[in-house]
Image (cartoon, rainbow, N blue to C red):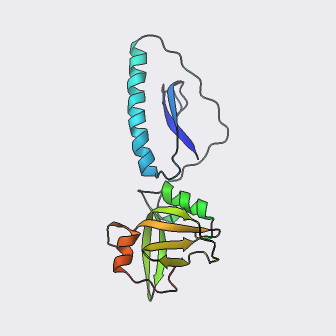
Amino acid sequence: ETTTGVTTFFIDEQIDTGNILLQKSTEIGREETAGELHDRLMKTGAALVVDTVEMIAAGPVNTTRQKHITSVKNAPKLGRENSRISWDQTDMVVYNKIRGLSPYPGAWTELENNSETLRIKIFRASPADIRVAGVPGQLKVTGQHLFACTGKGWLELLEIQLPGKRRMTVREVLNGMNLPANACFR
């Protein structure tokens, strides 16, 4: 999605079907996470509620009927089952999943590191302009930068969380961790 917004409406006998009072739409930033968008919409929504109350207090209000929608998009509960990253998807699908699940519950993957498997949460990434072929989940370390190959393209990982640790920049993680040349996500 590229746009979203907030709406005030009257309550009626069904869920979310009452007449609309006011609406405010906004563009979703290209790098904005769900948490950042939430905080921005919280402020926009608070201002819209004040405007709505003032409008109702001033007298008769004009409302707009909601459009009857026949095909409803499901919004499944987010949890471990549907927040795991599938590295065979395109870079933009993986990138948007990371953004959409940050900060909660957090997109996660497993890192094969020598003889252990670590569950890693990824909170921030960025599309990378790497033209080297790779296999999905393959990792590439260049200096203090960590890149992960997807089904089509690469992402630079910027902020992650190792098991039992706090969220850290990749630079902080790489300062204290040596990844083997064949390290990969699965």
Q: Quadrant of residue 178?
A: bottom left
Residue 119: image x %, image y %? Answer: 43, 74
Horizontal arrangement in the rendering, residue 50 relative to residue 13 (left or right): left
The residue located at (50%, 83%) in the rendering is: 183
Instruction: Residue lying at the far top in this picture: please name it.
Output: 59
Instruction: Residue lying at the far front in this picture: please name it.
Output: 143
- In this rendering, the answer to whether 37 lies above or below 132 is above
Instruction: Residue lying at the far bottom in this picture: please name it.
Output: 115
Q: Depth check: 96 or 174 in front?
A: 174
Q: Is residue 122 visible?
A: yes
Q: Depth check: 129 or 126 in front?
A: 129
Residue 73: image x %, image y %? Answer: 61, 46
Q: Quadrant of residue 95?
A: bottom right
- In this rendering, the answer to whether 56 lies above or below 85 is above
Instruction: Residue lying at the far right in this picture: please name it.
Output: 70
- Total number of numbered labels? 0
The residue located at (45%, 46%) in the rendering is: 37
Q: Is residue 185 visible?
A: no
Residue 78: image x %, image y %? Answer: 48, 56
Which quadrant: the C terminus? bottom right
Horizontal arrangement in the rendering, residue 164 relative to residue 144 (left or right): left
Residue 15: image x %, image y %? Answer: 52, 34
- In this rendering, the answer to whether 121 lies above or below 1 is below
Q: Quadrant of residue 136?
A: bottom right
